[in-house]
Image (cartoon, rainbow, N blue to C red):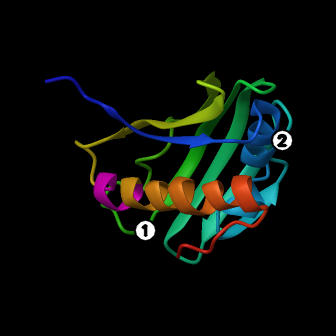
Amino acid sequence: MATTDFTTTLLVEQTPHELYLTVNNVRGWWQGEIEGGTDKLHDEFIYRMQEFHFSKQKLIELIPDEKVVWLITESRLHFTKDKEEWTGTKIIFDISVVHDKTQLRFTHQGLVSEIECYGACSNAWSQLVQQSLYSLITTGNGKNVF
């Protein structure tokens, strides 16, 4: 059986450039504490959500208006046996035009159903992307989903 990474997709009226800028405004849509740069190639930032989640991301690919990729270089998930489940995984934002709209395809590469945090993490990503990021893109204000 093939392993499938977690993916969710948005379709919006905004331009690819607007979507690209919004994705890189991580503080606007990912609730928690964020330290460091989030919008330039090789930027590294730390994300914390209370005592439950710590991760360090490095921006390893930026193609303006098309793609953003983060590599998780460190992680501590306090609700899983393997605290470092996210380490070495990638967060990918693919931006494209589909029938006069802009599509965002979000993929957490390595977040697969076989790992412990899949249920909680895929649910959290769904809320963050489908509600908070969508709201920031379409209204200019991210939603607090946690």
Asked if residue 131 is positioned above or below residue 99 in the image, the reply reads below
Q: Is residue 34 magenta?
A: no
Spatial CA distance of label 2 from label 1 is 27 Å
Closest to the camera, between mark 2 and mark 1, is 2
In terms of sequence position, does the residue under pointer 2 or pointer 1 come before the other? 2
Q: Which residue is mark 2?
A: 39
Q: Position of residue 73 (x, y in %)?
A: 60, 40
Q: Looking at the magenta stretch, what is its main secondary structure?
A: helix
- Report which quarter residue 120 is drawn in: bottom left
Q: Residue furthest left?
A: 1
Question: Badge 1 local density, few (<14 within 10 Å), some, or many (20+)?
Answer: few
Q: Position of residue 92 (x, y in %)?
A: 58, 33
On residue 131, the disc is none
- Report which quarter residue 43 is drawn in: top right
Q: Residue at x 44, y 50 (%)?
A: 84
- Left or right of 5? Residue 70 is right
Element class at badge 2: loop
Q: Quadrant of the N terminus?
A: top left
- Left or right of 44? Residue 1 is left
Q: Nearer the viewer, residue 58 or 96?
A: 96
Q: Nearer the viewer, residue 124 or 65?
A: 65
- Can residue 92 be seen here? The reply is no
Residue type (three-letter) at the residue carrying disc 1: His
Q: Residue furthest front?
A: 100
Element class at badge 1: loop
Q: Position of residue 8 (x, y in %)?
A: 45, 42
Q: Residue at x 59, y 33 (%)?
A: 103
Q: Which residue is mark 1?
A: 78
Q: Position of residue 112 (x, y in %)?
A: 31, 39
Which residues are drawn in magenta?
A: 117-121
- Left or right of 4? Residue 126 is right
